[in-house]
Amino acid sequence: MFLASDAMKGRDAGSGEYDIAAAYVAAQFQAAGLTPMGANGSYLQPVPLVAYKLAEGARAALADGAALEAGQDIAFAANPAAKATAVSAPVVFVGHGLEAPAFGIDDYAGLDVRGRIVAYIGGAPAGLPSEVAATMGGPQERLRAAAAHGAVGAIALADLRAAGRGSPAFAGVVTAQASERVTWATPAGVGNSATPATPLLATLSPAGGAKLFGKAWPAIVKAAARKALRRVPAVSVAPLTITSATTFRAMPSSNVVGMLPGSDPALAGEMVVLSAHLDHVGVGKPVNGDAIYNGAMDDAVGIATLIEEARRFKAAGAAPKRSILFLAVTAEEKGLVGSDYFVNHPPVPIDRIVADVNLDMPILTYRFEDMVAFGGDRSTLGPIIARATGALGVALSPDPIPEMSIFVRSDHYNFVRKGVPSVFLWPGLKGPGRAAFDTFMNNCYHRPCDDLNQPFLWGEGVRFLDANYRIAREIADAPQRPVWNKGDYFGTLYKGPMAP
């Protein structure tokens, strides 16, 4: 009720109201007897958020000196890792620009892109498991692959495939690229980037692509139209020159971190993380006269569950064998930024974090008949999760909404990217679930409607809490730490502990 009140004005990361909410959570952690794990003996881990935006004056020129027109041919991207960007290099078309040998995908086979700009088509190849497709759908994996092969930048090609996650529509990109974005700041005073030497430079419209690739463009369009995209061999064009500038604005915030020490001398140094995001989207466009986006379900319920988990662990009497780290993160709504900062600046070495159990936006307006464990079946967490949900009398169901790419849209994903087995548990959509889910997503998700006037069934919150408590408790007390299933895509990609 406190976190979702109008007084918190939607808990936007970087706002004074968010800071009040963080102080509230810190006080609850202290009341639950948790050990502070933030800075200077406090529960707050400062997170140097920085907003960045493309400055005016970006330019793109072809080899003959002709310019690409901003807003028509090209939408420039702000580079979070540099105040000024200047790249001039040949451009190589690389299809989807992805590598996944386990699925027969190798768009760099036979290509040398060192010192070049790569151009790619968005979206994910057909026929992939939903969680793998969600990972490949966005730009991160493309930039990682491009950087690994020595490219100096990347450009996306818009409107060549059906719009969807990671498959950009140019009109939307023009608007999005002009907006302010958020990351965390490095000591150099610019923003963090996983590929600072290989930035996303821009997105091209079909008109811009035709100007850049010339006679080769029809072959690229034809290749993109195929259901199973095939790279066009040896498509490379003369240098493209792009210059741009990025402006930065500091917006400091904090994560809230507390620990329940483990009881086993041999295992207490290992930690199970329970995570939830504290921020929401603040004050926005009024809807029926209400401009406060309270974020009750998203994710005040998750934070309330986190606090109740701390109380339950403390009330259990016997402490778990491993330590439990309770983590409320900032800037999830800005792109999982607070959890990304945490996994890159953990209070203990990252290899001592054995699992993450994430609590985000359980919809509590119906009696759930099943649960969905995003990422749960990829590691030895799977049987633990099944036992926990089975104790509630509900079964586990596969991802019912793979098109929404939920697996990559909450904070557990940043732990996955550090090789940590993780799970994000949701009430499922069987029985009344589908209608309740659709009602929330269509009417209240990221809208003022997500407030305490919704028909909460608080008993369902208790069931949700119970399942997550059982999972975390069993992980903490198990003789062995969780490991990825043998050969799992994510365990292999991010080099986590693997089953033999």
Image: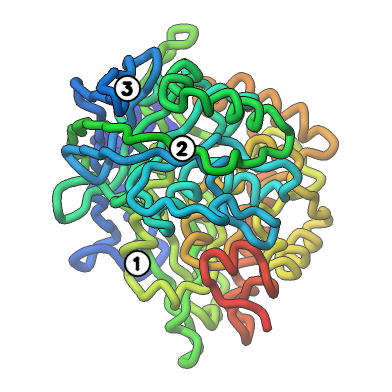
Q: Position of residue 74 (x, y in %)?
A: 38, 21
**Residue 303 seen from this side:** no
Residue closer to the observer: 164 or 125: 125
Q: Amino acid at mark 2?
A: Ala
- Which is in the foreground here, disc 3 or disc 2? 2
Q: Is residue 17 above or below residue 206?
A: below
What is the CA distance from the residue labelled 2 to the residue labelled 1?
Answer: 35 Å
Question: Against 36, is 318 above or below?
Answer: below
Q: Amino acid at mark 1?
A: Pro
Type of residue at label 3? Answer: Ala
- Residue plotted at (67% across, 47% down): 426
Residue identifier under label 1: 346
Nearer-the-camera pick, 103 or 269: 103
Precedes in sequence: disc 3 or disc 2: 2
Q: Secondary structure at mark 2?
A: strand
Q: Is residue 165 above or below residue 111?
A: above
Residue 395 visible somewhere in the drawing? yes
From the image, state whether disc 2 or disc 1 is nearer to you: 2
Left or right: where 159 falls relative to 117: right
Q: Which mark is residue 14?
A: none
What is the number of the mark on residue 178? 3
**Sequence-wise first label, 3 or 1:** 3
Left or right: where does residue 294 sit relative to residue 45? Answer: right
Say which residue appears at 22% left-offset and 63% top-offset: 39
The answer to the question of whether label 3 and label 2 lie on touching residues, with beta carbons closer than 8 A, is no
